[in-house]
Each structure stands twice: as structure tokens, then as C-alpha cells.
Image: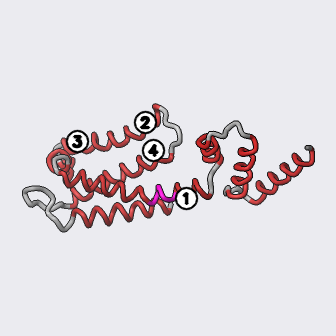
């Protein structure tokens, strides 16, 4: 939830500050609320889908379709909704085709805001992987080290992960008891 709050604040303030005071296109037109709103929502769509892509460990075809297809559907929606009569689309009438797509400012702001919004998420995931790895992260770490067949290294990493994993007290105590029983049997 905190990630969503940070991302929302970053998107809102960066879009407002980068589009509001200056002229938007080469004719000197300033960005109106329809432009700022479409840019903000484009950034939201990009950030959410990029965070999903960063959270996925293994990509499958269906994940590619949903992640990148979500972004594609947003732009398709902007084009189709903007093509409807102005009585239906109101302030979104041809806003993407005539205003956003040809303006380099839109693409630059979208790229800049998406990168700025992903930095806290990437930092959190890096800290989590380093200090509080889940079981999947531990397995990836062992594979990356090239020691998947070394039982001593595997046991050492397993012990470290049991100490640092966010598992409840009861689960940790049961795991310690089972490990103690295993040592007694040997």
C-alpha cells in the first residue's frame, strides 16, 4: 500500500510540475487538464504494468500478453474514445491523436515519471532480496552462485533464510524443532 501511495504522489507531482507552467507544444499552447490527466493516467498504466513485470520471476506468453497488452489497450482506448463525437468524449476529443502523440514532451514526461516512480520499488525489492529473501529468491541465489549441487552451501543458505524470512514465530519454532530432531537422528 505504501508503494502505491509513493507511486501516486510521484506521478501526480511530477506530471503537474512538468506540464503545468511551461508551454506544451511548439505553438506555445499550455497543457490543459485533459492533457495533464491523460498524461497522468498513462504514467499510472505504465508504472503498474512495469511493476508487475518487475515482480514476475519467469515470463510466460500469457504474462507478456497481459502486461504489455494492458499498455496497448490504454493507448487503443485513448484513440477510440477520442475518435467518438465530442458530445460523447467531451474533453478527451482527439486529445491523444492531435495533442499527446505528436508532442515530444508527452513521451519524455511519461518516460521520466515512470522511471522516477519505479526507483523506490526497485530499491525496496533489492533490499528485500538481500536481507529478507523469500524461498524463491534463495533458490535463485543458489542457482546464480552455481552451487545448486553443493549440499553444505545449500544448508548454510537455508539456515540464513530461516533466520531472516518473515515467517511467524510458530513456523520458525517448528522448523527449529524439526531441524533439531534431524540432527539427533544423525
Position of residue 56 in the picture relative to residue 98 (left or right)? right
Q: Residue at x 75, y 41 (%)?
A: 151
Looking at the picture, how far across and down is residue 37, in whole percent?
A: 27, 57
84 or 23: which is nearer to us? 23
**Is residue 86 at least partly visible in the picture?**
no
Residue under label 1: 127
User: Which of the two labelled residues, at mark 3 and mark 2, occupies the earlier sequence position?
Assistant: 2
- Which class describes the residues within 10 Å of circle 4: few (<14), some (14-19), or many (20+)? some
Looking at the picture, how far across and down is residue 4, in whole percent?
A: 45, 59
Task: Give the extent of the magenta segment.
Answer: 120-124
Instruction: Give the distance between the C-alpha atoms of the residues marked 3 and 4, in whole angstroms.
Output: 25 Å
User: Which of the two labelled residues, at mark 1 and mark 2, occupies the earlier sequence position?
Assistant: 2
User: Which of the two labelled residues, at mark 3 and mark 4, occupies the earlier sequence position?
Assistant: 4
- Which class describes the residues within 10 Å of circle 3: few (<14), some (14-19), or many (20+)? some
Position of residue 127 in the picture relative to residue 96 (left or right)? right
Residue under label 2: 64
**Is 122 one of the magenta-colored residues?**
yes
Position of residue 64 in the picture relative to residue 172 (left or right)? left
Residue under label 3: 79
| Eye-nearest disc, 1 or 2 | 1
Looking at the picture, how far across and down is residue 109, in whole percent?
A: 26, 56
Q: Secondary structure at mark 2?
A: helix
Residue under label 4: 53
Say if mark 3 contacts mark 4, CB within 8 Å: no
| Eye-nearest disc, 3 or 2 | 2
- Which class describes the residues within 10 Å of circle 2: few (<14), some (14-19), or many (20+)? few
In what quadrant of the picture does the C terminus appear? top right
Vertical placement of 66 versus 129: above or below?
above
Q: Residue at x 61, y 46 (%)?
A: 141
Amino acid at each position: 500500500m505504501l508503494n502505491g501511495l509513493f507511486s501516486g504522489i510521484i506521478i501526480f507531482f511530477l506530471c503537474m510540475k512538468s506540464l503545468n507552467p511551461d508551454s506544451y507544444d511548439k505553438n506555445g499552447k499550455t497543457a490543459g487538464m485533459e492533457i495533464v490527466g491523460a498524461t497522468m493516467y498513462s504514467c499510472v498504466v505504465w508504472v503498474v504494468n512495469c511493476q508487475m513485470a518487475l515482480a514476475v520471476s519467469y515470463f510466460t506468453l500469457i504474462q507478456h500478453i497481459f502486461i504489455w497488452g494492458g499498455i496497448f489497450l490504454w493507448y487503443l482506448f485513448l484513440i477510440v474514445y477520442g475518435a467518438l463525437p465530442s458530445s460523447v468524449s467531451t474533453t478527451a476529443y482527439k486529445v491523444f491523436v492531435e495533442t499527446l502523440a505528436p508532442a515530444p514532451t508527452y513521451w519524455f514526461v511519461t518516460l521520466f515519471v515512470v522511471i522516477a516512480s519505479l526507483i523506490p520499488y526497485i530499491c525496496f525489492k533489492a533490499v528485500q532480496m538481500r536481507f529478507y529473501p523469500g524461498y524463491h529468491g534463495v533458490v535463485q541465489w543458489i542457482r546464480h552462485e552455481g552451487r545448486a549441487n553443493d549440499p553444505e552451501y545449500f544448508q548454510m543458505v537455508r539456515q540464513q533464510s530461516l533466520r531472516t524470512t518473515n515467517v511467524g514465530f510458530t513456523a520458525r519454532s517448528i522448523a527449529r524443532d524439526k531441524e533439531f530432531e534431524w540432527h539427533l537422528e544423525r
